[in-house]
Amino acid sequence: MRAGIQFSVLGPVRLLRQGVEEVAGQPRQCAVLASLLLRAGRPVNLSTLVDDVWGDEAPPSAVGSVRTYVYRLRQSLGGLSDSCVRLIDGGYLLHIRPEALDLNRFKETAAKAREARSGGDLTLAADLLSESLGMWNGVALAGVPGPFAETQRGVLGELRLACAEEQLACEVERGNYAEAAAELSALLVEHPLRERVCGLLMTALYGAGRQSEALTIYHTTSHLLRQRLGVNPSPELQQVHERILSGRFQLPRTSHRLAEGRAVSAQVPAQLPAALPALVGREKEQGQVERLAEDAQASSSVAICVVGGMAGVGKTAFATAAGHRLAERFPDGQLFADLHGAGPGLEPRDPGEVLAGFLHSLGVRPEAMPPSTQARGLMFRGLLAKRRMLVVLDNAAGTDQVKDLLPGSAGSMALITSRMQLHALVAAYQALPLTLLPLSQDEARSFLARRLGAARTAAEPEAVDRIIAFAGCLPLALANIAARAAYRPQMHLTSLADEYTPSTDNILDAFASDEDPTLDVRTSIARSYHRLDP
């Protein structure tokens, strides 16, 4: 924890005392503080502060308001010697220790990184640049009004972008082509006319063996430059293009100091939930999924399977079991997300939020996380390129929710469950649709025998059949009944079957689960009912 008072402008304007944030004041007071902070050590007169906050629209009360804001700032600072506002030569001067402002620490750390890079220590340079970017907390001076803040947002944003470029250039020079390409792709989406980003991305793609993609990126950027600015690509960018095209492109040589640094190792996520000890039935469907995975790995396509069916039919259990059976085929990892498409009291999850979780699992640092869903999707697909990964998307609300979460290159597979029929996914991506039906009578008997013991179910076959009929052969309903029976081992199944009778006031109450809403058949079916069109 840093001692004394600290100030932040790399995000919302903040004032922290001993690491604890204090109120910096209303937006215009923050604008005055920002003006003083970014001119620390120099007096700022009243008229300049008024212009900084209001520009040409200053009201008659502006001067008095500024004086009030400065008075409040003085009160907040408490007159401490290391941070105070003084009246000098008709202007206000904010005195702070240089390290008390995050912008100064950012610049100092970035300068150390440039020194390390010039000395050939790419690992240290990349770490320092990553540390610099980690000091940011969103857009600089976020929410601060006035023309001065607007101008400074652009200036500081340029510093941040240059630092990000420098950090990714280090990664390219270190030979981390695939990881750098993923981050550069997202950065180019946010800044499509940034020629250095384009050049670095082309280099990273070429280094990762994706020459055609590198050439496509060049043509896209070249077209945008001509269309929006009326200019051709810079000579440097044209040179990169020509050398890649001719096969004469020389990748940057990694520094001899690289061997001394820490290697970047790709993280291998294993996120599948625990599988059931044994899945009853579904042999035909499991075979279809395994053949799809085999065919996709033998071709140049991505395997996509959509598992559908009514509430309680066992879609999640099937997908989880299939994922575990297929895990060895996808040694680079398995990702899992519950999309809350149909659940008790939950709204469908935002794809951008899900992508952020996936990218974090793949090792993307928070400061490198793209802000938009589109950019996150590009980074996600870039990181999965040349990898064999399984992505399980459970409980999808529709095609729009999952399309940005799909792998983009051959060798990977997506397994999706949904109560909705995802026609667009099947039509556009040639996904394999599988519809799970309730278990057969024999499969339902086997289900209960495994849960309750073969001897117990064999002793009362008629009661077992009544329970199965009441549950409609739905695995989730059978599981709920079996759980109640397991807690009462001395109870006859006939007595248990008597509890589940059509005369029950609300028949679905028999399948309620107060402990886990995801196991509540009543809520599950009700949610599907409410999603129906009037």
Image: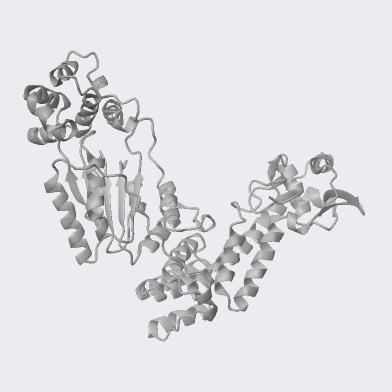
Q: Within the image, what quadrant is residue 68 found in?
A: top right
Can residue 511 be seen here? The reply is: yes
Question: Image quadrant of residue 387?
Answer: bottom left
* Image-quadrant location for residue 430: bottom left
Rendering coords of residue 509 (x, y %):
26, 20
Q: Residue at x 35, y 42 (%)?
A: 339
Residue 39 position in % (x across, y down): 78, 57
Q: Is residue 215 left or right of residue 274?
A: right
Position of residue 130 in the picture relative to residue 16 (left or right): left
Whether residue 210 sits left or right of residue 322 in the image: it is: right
Q: Nearer the viewer, residue 92 or 344?
A: 344
Q: Quadrant of the C terminus?
A: top left
Question: How many numbered dots are placed on residues in this image?
Answer: 0
Report if residue 233 is visible in the image: no
Residue 36 at x, y percent in the picture: 78, 52
Note whether 329 is above or below 452 in the view shown. Answer: below
Residue at 25 percent across and 60 percent down: it is 329
- Residue 261's spot in the image, x, y percent? 53, 72
User: Between 464 and 190, which is closer to the camera in this rendering?
Assistant: 464
The colour style of the image is one colour
Residue 348 vs 306, above or below: the answer is above
